[in-house]
Image (cartoon, coloured by chain):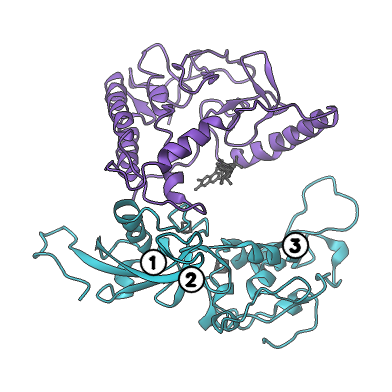
Amino acid sequence: MTATADAPAEVGTIPSMTVTLKILRFDPDGLDGREPGTEYWEEFQVEAHATDRVLDALHKIKWDQDGSLAFRRSCAHGVCGSDAMRINARNRLACKTLLKDLNPARPITVEPLKGLPVEKDLIVDMEPFFASYREIMPFLMTSGPTPERERLQSPEDRAKFDDTTKCILCAACTTSLPRVLDRRPVLRAPGHRGCPPFHLRLARRGRVGPSRDPQRQGGRVEVPHGLQLHRGLPARHRGDQGHLRGQEGVDHRRDLGLRPRLAS
Amino acid sequence: MFPTAHYAMGGIPTNVQGEVLRDNTHIIKGLYAAGECACVSVHGANRLGTNSLLDINVFGRRAGIAAAEYANGLAEAPALPADASARLEETVASLRSTVGSDKTERVAQLRKELQETMDRNVQVFRTAESLAEAHAVVKDLQERYQSIAIHDRGTRFNTDLLEAIEPGLPAGACPRWSSRAPSPARSRVAATTVRTSRRVTTRTSCSTPWPTSAPTAPSSLDWKPVVVTKYQPMERKY
Ligand SMILES: Cc1cc2nc3c(=O)[nH]c(=O)nc-3n(C[C@H](O)[C@H](O)[C@H](O)COP(=O)(O)OP(=O)(O)OC[C@H]3O[C@@H](n4cnc5c(N)ncnc54)[C@H](O)[C@@H]3O)c2cc1C
Ligand code: SF4
Ligand code: FES
């Protein structure tokens, strides 16, 4: 029994309830007799409103009950990408997930993203993700002399990568790939790196369409050696931002001027 | 819904090369600032939309070039004072010693009260009364800060410790800020003491450099003349 509505709410007030969060913790220091690097589940009860977000519940724990609970967050409204975590077995942003959308009558499980090394509690090391992002070089790469004025882009070409401009680099999609969930590392050592589909989509930012760099028209795009390129991610693995929907039809390899290859 | 900060006006005064100014004429050699933390004074009484990123592109680049030139011209890096990190180390040690102590205040509660009073009393339109109220609240919070305890003994990603340092309560940033404008004579850039219903950006526009030689020293107010060139101050009309 984890959710109990208070006495009948007055008109206009939102009833509060007791919500249980079951959090997978990671102790890098080995405190309280634990081995350094111990993983353990801990349950917390918080008073919350159905309209509160998981981030609010985490804050209530950190601020009122156990200050040692560690998680990242910054903007608290879905624009900075720092609080992606696994909530009820799905990658989501804690600041955009309402308790009422999670069946708060049952314990809500919260875990760090899989496939990235855990630093402490819900904080993961994002470096492998960013290393792979850097390798893709998702910006405009031009050839020829610098023009006198800015490089214009046609609305049609801009539209082709519009969705990628919404990416906040939270890693929720990448770390929900089946290989990650199978606990096989998706971001491997340099030289043999799986390339998350979203990276490819970002790569299109700078490279799609000839309008910004006429000299590249029809030309192939250099892709760093060793990267594996895949087609779009099936919708069921999309990240929480929702904007990855419907990308099955998108072939990143073709957009990058490469031969299409089937998704792995 | 709750308010969030979009932009902080003012900042570390610099010249157009990003060199940090000690006062209106002297620079602090080898120290550079650019971006939102800096104040080159290009924004006037209010930063216009999109100009923050432009500011960063222009003055970040300039500061980088100037810093590289300065560093290249040096035979060796200037020595830091031996006690450069002493103050922070002391803060960290004293906060760590509160774990498991009988102190009961939580910094989260103090921060909430600080946010509420700053939001209510030290916003863009402020009055002498509202500032006096904020001042009293902040003083009280500073006293209560002596009784806070953190929970986390950890050495990695100790965000509990970080959150206890971040509000800057001991250093007293807020009282300095809120003590800034009660004087009716001082209408600061982008922060107006409400006296009339007209909003006029006049010559009294000034930047108020805030020398911080010693963090615990009483704050002092200084003035920086505003050079009016092409655009004359005028009443703000909506
Ligand atoms: C919602 C929102 C929308 C905005 N929209 C626009 C817009 O459309 N156009 C525009 O021009 N401006 C906009 N701005 C303003 C603009 O985004 C910011 O002013 C600008 O990004 C500031 O950049 P910065 O590099 O100076 O500072 P920041 O981006 O704030 O970088 C400061 C960095 O310092 C790090 N840091 C802090 N403390 C420490 C420490 N002790 N040690 C080491 N590192 C530390 C921080 O982690 C951070 O990475 C917007 C701001 C917000 C909040
Ligand atoms: S594509 Fe979406 S889910 Fe993936 S990293 Fe970007 S914002 Fe996060
Ligand atoms: S805290 Fe910024 S995206 Fe959630």
Q: Which class describes the residues within 10 Å of circle 3: few (<14), some (14-19), or many (20+)?
A: some
Callout 3, which amino acid? Met
Pointer 2 and pointer 1: residues touching (CB < 8 Å)?
A: yes
C-alpha distance separating marks 3 and 2? 24 Å
Q: Quadrant of residue A66?
A: bottom left
Pick whichever of labels 2 and 1 is earlier in the sequence: 1
Pick whichever of labels 3 and 2 is earlier in the sequence: 3
**Camera-nearest residue between B194 and B153:** B153
Pointer 1 and pointer 3: residues touching (CB < 8 Å)?
A: no
Q: Is residue A172 above or below residue B144?
A: below
**Camera-nearest residue between B104 and A159:** B104
Residue B175 image offset from top left, x and y in percent: 38, 24
Pointer 2 chain: A
- Give me the disc on residue A137: 3
Q: Residue at x 31, y 39 (%)?
A: B110
Q: Which chain is cyan?
A: A
Q: Residue at x 55, y 40 (%)?
A: B49
Pointer 3 chain: A
**In this rendering, would A223 be left or right of A60?**
right
Q: Quadrant of residue B23?
A: top right
- Give me the disc on residue A240: 2
Residue B216 image offset from top left, x and y in percent: 46, 21
- Give me the disc on residue A97: 1
